[in-house]
Amino acid sequence: MMPSCKDITEHSSDYLDRNLPWWKRPGYWLHLAMCVHCRRYVEQLKLTIATIGKSPNAVPPSISTDEMQTIVEKMKQSTKK
């Protein structure tokens, strides 16, 4: 089953980090091959990650992984409303 554009944007970090389950990857490859908008989105995300990684001022946050996960979950819930 091919993912939707929404699926691509929601899981693009997992896709780029190679954390996407193996059975989902072919659908993502196919979608990105067909959808110029999602392809651009993923390329822009790659560029953003690379740019931030090269910044001398980029400092990882001083919070735990659990705290970060809580923040992400709250952000997801606020966007669903």
Image: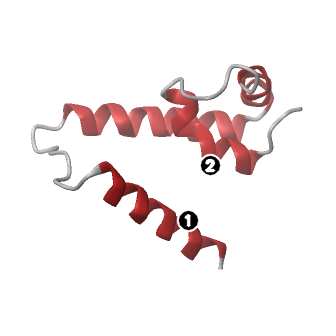
The reply to whether discs 1 and 2 touch (Cβ–Cβ < 8 Å) is no
Q: Mark 1, mark 2: which one is toward the viewer?
A: 1
x 32%, y 49%: residue: 65
Which amino acid does the dot numbered 1 rest on? Lys
Which disc number belongs to residue 27?
none
61 or 49: nearer the eye?
A: 61
Q: Position of residue 32 (x, y in %)?
A: 72, 29
Query: Marks 1 and 2, Cα distance to the nearest angstrom?
Result: 10 Å
Provide residue 16's location: percent of width, then percent of height: 52, 28
Q: Is residue 79 left or right of residue 1?
A: left
The residue to which callout 2 is attached is 10
Q: Is residue 79 left or right of residue 55?
A: right
Mark 1: which secondary structure? helix
Neighbourhood count class around disc 1 (C-alpha, 10 Å): few under 14, some 14–19, many 20 upward: few
- Looking at the figure, which quarter contains the N terminus? top right
Of the pair 78 and 31, the residue shown nearer to us = 78
Quarter of the C terminus within the rendering: bottom right
Quarter assignment of residue 57 = top left
Task: Say which element carries label 2.
Answer: helix
Question: Badge 1 is on which residue?
Answer: 76
Q: Kindly identify the amino acid type of the residue bearing the numbered disc 2.
A: Glu
Picture residue at 48% right of the left edge, 70% below the top: 74
- In the image, residue 81 above or below residue 49: below
Q: In the image, 57: left or right of 1?
A: left
35 displayed left or right of 55: right
Residue ID at (72%, 46%): 7
Vertical placement of residue 57 versus 72, above or below: above
Q: Does residue 66 lie above or below 41 as drawn?
A: below
Farthest residue to the right: give it. 1
For label 2, count other residues whose C-alpha is less than 10 Å away and answer few (under 14), some (14-19) or many (20+). few
- The image's colour scheme reads secondary structure
29 vs 67, nearest the viewer: 67
